[in-house]
Amino acid sequence: MIDSKVDYSITLNETNIIKGIAICAMLWHHLFLECHEYGEAVFKLALTCKVCVALFVYLSGYGMAIQLKNVDYKVFFSMCIDIVKFLVRRYFKFYLNYWVVFFLSVFLGSFIFSRSLEVAYGSNWLLCFMRDAFGFQGYNSYNITWWFNSLILVLWAFFPLLYWALKSKLVCVWVLVLVLFDPGGILKPLGSLAIFFLQYLVVFVFGICAAAHADIINKVLNRVNGYVFLALSLVVTILLLYMRNHYVLFCFLGMRGDPFIAFFLSLTVVGACSLCKTRMSVMAYLGKHSMNMYLMHTFICGYFFREFIYGFKCPILIFILLLLISLILSIAVEFFKKKIHFYELQRKVCLFLE
């Protein structure tokens, strides 16, 4: 008898696969969202691919919750120290990796591609440059795609409170009701903290919740044959992606459907990897490079080589070209990091922070 039991916890490899899917979606979204000349199907797919942001946010919440599962929340002082150290390491790793690309981009953009700080930021360029270096320049960043930085950095700041609340089964239900429906507009004042904060707070909560209650999810889902649930989760994911941009049910239209898409797409990937015994190595490899590709691809298709990229006319060729160039640049950045012993420095600092 074929074993159809599945551990629906997301492994590191499956995380990278989902990140690979997300970065491909991001590239398609940015390439064709404003290019209607390639046809309705290409545009509609670009619109749907906006879900890429939700996938990254969901994985961030899930991954952080998994890493903090062993923290003892009963000992308050010890808990606070562990959480502070955890967040400091998280922010440190982000900034260290971000700054490599940020300063390289600003240097090359200013001195080779004529995108000076004054062109990018205006007359108040020094203050804007400093804000951008810390990820809080929003749509006015040196690279407009970096608006996402402020969102994820603010969400991380809320993580300890959210995780503490979501660990409780009873409180978890009320938190989900709060972020999904926001009765009385309780959360509305938080919307000014970052771009789309309230919309992606729901996704972040879904990711934390899925990790905090992974055992319950496993127990419930394994009552169904794994192959049956894989087919079901795939169909549900496709339907949700369709409903995201077609009015079927209002509760799944637009970004309202993103938390559910992220959840079911993750289950689909995990189920496929487990039951089909595949590691989806190509997509996982892209996922490993997803942060660098996210940080750099808009320079290629939006700022410096737009005419070259779109000169290939065919959407598939345009997408493949941007994907390959972004990947090659990421590989070059990682090679540069190794040469300057970047990860050795990161490891030593993280050990010091322990």
Image (cartoon, rainbow, N blue to C red):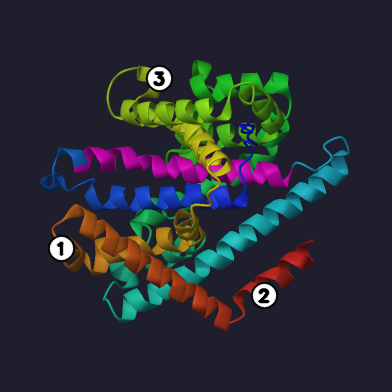
> Residue 5 appears in which quarter of the rendering?
top right
Q: Residues within 10 Å of mark 1 (few under 14, many from 20)?
A: few
- Report how far apart the C-alphas of labels 2 and 3 lie in the structure: 47 Å
In this orientation, which residue lies closer to the viewer: 102 or 211? Answer: 211
Q: Main secondary structure of the magenta part?
A: helix
Q: Is residue 330 above or below residue 316?
A: below
| In contact (CB < 8 Å): disc 1 and disc 3 | no
Residue 55 on the magenta span:
yes
Residue displayed at 33% across by 68% down? 325
Q: Secondary structure at mark 1?
A: loop
- Report how far apart the C-alphas of labels 2 and 1 lie in the structure: 42 Å
Q: Which mark is residue 345?
A: 2
Residue displayed at 54% across by 66% down? 97
Residue 3 in the image: state x and y as whole percent: 64, 33
Amino acid found under the numbered disc labelled 3: Cys
Residue holding disc 1:
312
Residue 263 in the image: state x and y as whole percent: 52, 33
- Camera sees residue 93: yes
| Quadrant that contains the C terminus | bottom right
Residue 258 in the image: state x and y as whole percent: 43, 32
Amino acid found under the numbered disc labelled 1: Phe
Residue holding disc 3:
251
Earlier along the polypeptide chain: callout 2 or callout 1? 1
The span shown in magenta is: 42-68
